[in-house]
Amino acid sequence: MIKAQKQLLLISGCLFLQGNSYSIQNTRFYSSRARPPVLKLSSSNENYEDNPVCHCLLPSQQQRRSFIQTLANSLALSSFVAMEGSVSAIDLEGLPKITQRVFMDVRISRSDGTFYVKDTPNIDQAGVIDEPFYGQLVLGLFGNRAPNHVKQFMQYVEVPFEVDNPLPSYSRARFTTLDINNGLLIGGVIPGLDVKTLAGGNVLEYGSRVIPAKLWIEPVKAQEQESTETKPLSHDRKGLLTHRNLDLTPSFGIITRTKSTFLDGSNTVFGCILEDKDGFLNKVVDLPVLTDEGKVSRTELNSEIDLISADGGIRESLASSVFTAQRKIFRDAAKTFGDSRLDKVYNGKLLRRIEVTKVGVL
């Protein structure tokens, strides 16, 4: 806004100059100790055309008009871009009332996993600049439709600050997985927060803390009612926030495609993406991910039309299916023998560090 105001002031000043000519009278050359020349304003053009000094100092009328037009176009374009960025990232028609608004500042690392400032930008083999990405998401929560989910979600947003023994928070969370088959982006994964078994029950362990683990599911009575105010929402559009019903962790999913109704039975919608001003979601879905066939991205998949089925999934060849099955057998066997290295290698793993740096309530 401040930048736009400065541009408006500059344009106004140029318009003023267009109607008033400046002339320098009694121009002479002076030494460094002599008195400098006096600039006088003149509302006429009588001295402008014949004074060569003025021709050197002031642009012509055509140049002034061209400069003003360029500034006006730049201002209009910047205003248009600002309006485009403020548009909601989801179609809100038919969705419940937004009861809470939460922001998340996010960042995406370079291909080498770094964020620090470099003197010269990284350029990959394809000639694309490989630099960190910074953006912000604004989330809207459906507190009336999914009250228990929103309550559990907010416990990781409004977290009191403690230096010695911090509580788990979304401000240190990561986006870790993108399923290329259905476009589900998994975020809210807090490093160091694990599900453990204690005295025959499940708990969340974070550092030296042991936190009760509760399911996010809504009360059965509310789900059985026919009222549209309590009926679970369908995963019918891009930008919805969802949580797996039997998941004890605070990780959540974001729908990055237009329709994912196959999640209706196993997940619950509790919010949506209200704003994505910097294009975070579009950036993420183009990042490379790890699959059973190796490293792949959405751009590469779109170039292979034969691999994309009508419902948005990926058709596998017979050889690929056999290879995937064999790999699964060997991985399951390795897990049986306690090979922890497999925890870092999984299908859909994003090959960039995507972190939340700040979270708060709007």
Image (tube, helix red, strand yellow):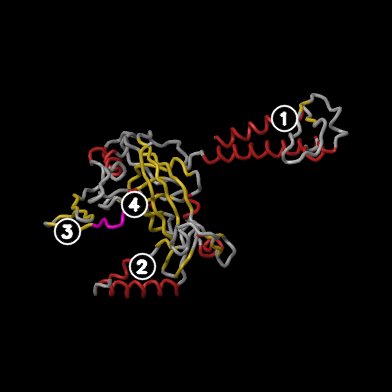
Q: Which of marks 1 and 3 is in front?
A: 1
Q: Residues within 10 Å of mark 1 (few under 14, many from 20)?
A: some
Q: How far apart are marks 1 and 3 (CA)?
A: 74 Å
Q: Which of 126 and 208 is in front in this view?
A: 208
Q: Distance between the residues labelled 3 and 4?
A: 24 Å
The answer to whether marks 1 and 3 mark residues whose Cβ atoms lie closer than 8 Å is: no
Residue matched to label 1: 15
Q: Which of marks 4 and 2 is in front?
A: 4
Mark 3 or mark 2: whose residue is earlier in sequence? 3
On the image, which quarter does residue 50 sit in?
A: top right
Q: Is the magenta stretch mostly helix, strand or loop?
A: loop
Mark 4 or mark 1: whose residue is earlier in sequence? 1
Which residue is at 68% across, 30% downward? 13
Where does the image place residue 169, in percent across and percent down from the top left?
30, 48
Secondary structure of the residue carrying numbered label 1 = helix
Q: Distance between the residues labelled 3 and 2?
A: 24 Å
Residue matched to label 2: 345
Q: Distance between the residues labelled 4 and 1?
A: 51 Å
Q: How crowded is mark 3: few (under 14 residues within 10 Å), some or many (20 or more)?
A: few
Q: What residue type is labelled 3?
A: Thr
Q: Read off the magenta span.
A: 188-194
Mark 3 or mark 4: whose residue is earlier in sequence? 4
Mark 1 or mark 3: whose residue is earlier in sequence? 1
Quick check: 170 above or below 80?
A: below
**In this rendering, position of residue 340 left or right of residue 120:** left
Q: Residue 197 carries which label?
A: 3
Q: Nearer the viewer, residue 314 or 164?
A: 164
Mark 4 or mark 2: whose residue is earlier in sequence? 4
Q: What residue type is labelled 2?
A: Val
